[in-house]
Image: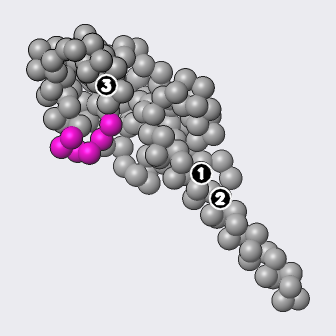
Amino acid sequence: MTVSVRQVLESKGNKTFCVAPGVTVFEALSVMAEHNIGSVLVTEGDRLLGIFTERDYARKVVLKGLRSADVSVRELMTGTPTIVSPDQSIDEVMNIMTEKRFRHLPVLEDGRIAGIITIGDVVKSIIDQQRQTIQHLSNYIAGEIAT
């Protein structure tokens, strides 16, 4: 059974946390810390401009000796991020994440933000699928033995 991004979002929820491009990196990190998340979407109104992640912070602020209170998210975000649609399969998303080394992907439907999917969501979905397959096979084998 193929699981879609839509099914994962229905299960986990589609809550996203967004910041404006002009906020400081410090403010974006505060939002991330408050909600225990690893990324925020950068938006203007309903329009997705980019994504800012913990990795962006580590590589673009800390290693360059910048101060998070002095630099805006606009300067360091990943602009025009790779996006996925709710109808894509988790297998497709896993391939994108693996090939491009992404941990967070915005989900857009009809040009609007529908959620965000993380590597943790993908792994959980795959584990759940495998658990269901094992249960199904165990029931099948137990049924065969009982007859």
Residue at mark 2: 130
- Residue 23 visible in the snapshot: no
Which three-letter amino acid code belongs to the residue tagged 2? Gln
Residue 135 vertical position relative to residue 19 in the rendered view, above or below: below
Q: Position of 114 compared to 47: left or right?
A: right
Query: Residue 30's spot in the image, x, y percent?
Result: 16, 35
Marks 2/1: CA–CA distance: 6 Å
Q: Which residues are magenta?
A: 33-38
- The residue under the point 55% across, 23% down is 100
Q: Is residue 128 visible?
A: yes
Disc 3 or 1, which lies upstream in sequence?
A: 3
Q: Secondary structure at mark 3?
A: helix
Mark 1 is on which residue type? Ile
Residue at label 3? Answer: 58
Looking at the image, which residue is at 81% across and 77% down? Answer: 141
Residue contact between numbered discs 2 and 3, judged by CB atoms under 8 Å:
no
How packed mark 1 is, by other alpha carbons closer than 10 Å (few <14, some 14-19, many 20 or more), is: some
Helix, strand, or loop for circle 2?
Answer: helix
Nearer mark to the viewer, of 2 and 3: 3
